[in-house]
C-alpha cells in the first residue's frame, strides 16, 4: 500500500478505473448531466423569402420563412428543448435599424406566430441588437465620424425591447455590449408595463473570430471596421468579464451570458462561481461549423464531438446552453 499526497490511500488500493467499467456504471456515477430543458435553439427568420434558405457556412442551418420557423419551433418543443432565441433578417436596412422596432417588422410578426404556436410549451427569447437591421452592420447608431454612439443607441434598444415585449417575447436578450444597455432596457420595460419580463444579458461577449458563419446567417457583417471597440478583448483576463457581469446585474439583469462558449470556459467557470443567477453560454456559429466541417471530412465522430462539447460547457458552469444542435441533441438525450 502507498500513500498519495495529502495522506490518502494510493495504488493498489486506490483504483479509479473501477468506476469506469462499462457504460451503465459510468452513467450511474456521472455528475455532469445534460437535459433537453437546458438547451436553447437559435433560429433565423428572413423577410421576403418563400422557402428556407440554406446557410453555406452552417450546414443544416437555414434562414427560415415564417412558416418553416413555426415548424422548426414545434419540432424543438416536441423534443423537449427548453427555449429558442430569434434573430431577424429584414428585407430593408437603414442607418438606425428601423425594422428592429417596427410592429410590422419580421421579428415582431414571427414572434406573434411563435407565441400562438408554442407559447405555452417553451421559452421564446429575442436577441436585442441592431446589427441585423442596420445598413452599416454595427450594433448601434453612428456618429458623423463613424463611431458607435453608445448613449444614443440606448434609446433605440429601449424602443426595441418594448416592441419585442408587445409582440410576446418571454425574455429579451440584449447583445450589443453598449454600456448601460441593461439599465435602459429595464427602465423601458418597467415603464411600459412589462416589469415581469426577464432580461438575459450578453454580459461577457468577446470580439471573436468564431462569429463568422453567424454573419452569413444574419447578414450582418460590418461594412467597415470591426466590433472590437465595444465587444470584449479576448486578451483580457476574467476580471473584466466579472466587472461587466456585476454591472449588468446592478442594472437589473435576471440572467447573464458568456459568448462564445468553448474558447471561454475559464470565463464561464469564473462567472458561474461569482453569481447566484442563471448563467448561459452561447455555442456560437464557428464552433458549430468547425465540428460539422471536420465530421464531413471524416476526421472526427460527429455525434460524440457534439455531446462532448455540450458537456464541456455544462461542466464549466452553464445552466443554459444556446446551441444550433439543440433539437438534435434533445432527441438523443430523450
Image (tube, rainbow, N blue to C red):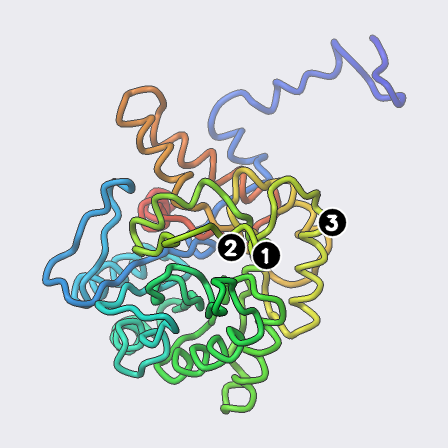
Q: Real-space Cα distance between discs 2 and 1?
A: 6 Å
The reply to whether the C-beta atoms of the residues labelled 2 and 1 are less than 8 Å apart is yes
Q: Which residue is mark 1?
A: 279
Instruction: State the residue at coordinates (86%, 14%).
Output: 3
The reply to whether the C-beta atoms of the residues labelled 1 and 3 are less than 8 Å apart is no
Q: Nearer the viewer, mark 2 or mark 3?
A: 3
Q: Real-space Cα distance between discs 2 and 3?
A: 22 Å
Q: Helix or strand or loop: what does disc 1 sit on?
A: strand
Q: Is residue 59 above or below residue 280?
A: above
Instruction: State the residue at coordinates (32%, 61%).
Output: 77
Residue 172: x %, y % from top left: 47, 71
Residue 327: x %, y % from top left: 32, 50
Nearer to me, 26 or 317: 317
Q: Helix or strand or loop: what does disc 3 sit on?
A: helix
Dot 1 or dot 3: first in sequence order is 3
Nearer to me, 262 or 175: 175
Image quadrant containing the N terminus: top right
Q: Which residue is mark 2?
A: 320
Q: Which residue is mark 3?
A: 239
Residue 96: x %, y % from top left: 39, 73
Circle 2 Cα neighbour tier, 10 Å, few/some/many (<14 / 14–19 / ≥20): many
Dot 2 or dot 1: first in sequence order is 1
Residue 174: x %, y % from top left: 50, 67
All told, the count of numbered labels is 3
Dot 2 or dot 3: first in sequence order is 3
Q: Helix or strand or loop: what does disc 2 sit on?
A: strand
The image quadrant that residue 133 belongs to is: bottom left
Q: Is residue 142 above or below residue 105?
A: above
Amino acid at each position: 500500500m502507498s500513500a498519495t499526497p495529502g495522506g490518502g490511500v494510493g495504488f493498489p488500493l486506490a483504483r479509479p478505473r473501477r468506476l469506469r467499467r462499462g457504460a451503465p456504471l459510468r452513467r450511474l456515477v456521472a455528475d455532469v448531466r445534460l437535459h433537453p430543458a437546458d438547451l436553447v435553439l437559435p433560429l433565423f427568420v428572413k423577410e421576403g423569402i418563400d422557402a428556407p434558405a440554406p446557410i453555406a457556412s452552417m450546414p443544416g442551418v437555414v434562414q427560415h420563412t415564417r412558416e418553416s420557423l413555426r415548424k422548426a419551433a414545434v419540432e424543438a418543443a416536441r423534443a423537449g428543448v427548453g427555449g429558442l432565441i430569434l434573430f431577424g433578417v429584414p428585407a430593408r436596412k437603414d442607418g438606425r435599424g428601423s425594422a428592429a422596432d417596427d410592429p410590422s417588422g419580421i421579428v415582431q410578426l414571427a414572434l406573434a406566430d411563435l407565441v400562438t404556436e408554442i407559447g405555452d410549451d417553451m421559452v421564446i427569447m429575442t436577441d436585442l441588437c441592431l446589427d441585423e437591421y442596420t445598413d452599416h452592420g454595427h450594433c448601434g447608431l453612428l456618429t458623423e465620424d463613424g463611431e458607435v454612439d453608445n448613449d444614443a443607441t440606448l434609446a433605440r434598444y429601449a424602443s426595441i425591447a418594448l416592441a419585442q415585449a408587445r409582440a410576446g417575447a418571454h425574455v429579451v436578450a440584449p447583445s450589443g455590449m453598449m454600456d448601460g444597455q441593461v439599465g435602459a432596457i429595464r427602465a423601458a420595460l418597467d415603464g411600459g408595463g412589462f416589469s415581469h419580463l426577464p432580461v438575459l444579458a450578453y454580459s461577457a461577449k468577446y470580439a471573436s473570430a468564431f462569429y463568422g458563419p453567424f454573419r452569413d446567417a444574419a447578414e450582418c457583417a460590418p461594412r467597415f471596421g470591426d466590433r472590437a471597440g465595444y465587444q470584449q478583448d479576448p486578451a483580457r483576463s476574467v476580471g473584466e468579464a466579472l466587472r461587466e457581469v456585476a454591472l449588468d446585474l446592478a442594472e437589473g439583469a435576471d440572467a447573464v451570458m458568456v459568448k462564445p462558449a468553448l474558447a471561454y470556459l475559464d470565463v464561464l467557470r469564473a462567472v458561474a462561481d461569482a453569481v447566484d443567477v442563471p448563467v448561459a453560454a452561447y455555442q456560437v456559429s464557428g464552433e458549430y461549423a468547425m465540428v460539422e466541417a471536420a465530421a464531413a471530412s471524416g476526421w472526427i465522430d460527429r455525434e460524440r464531438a457534439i455531446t462532448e462539447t455540450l458537456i464541456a460547457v455544462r461542466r464549466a458552469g452553464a445552466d443554459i446552453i444556446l446551441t444550433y444542435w439543440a433539437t438534435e441533441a434533445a432527441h438523443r438525450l430523450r
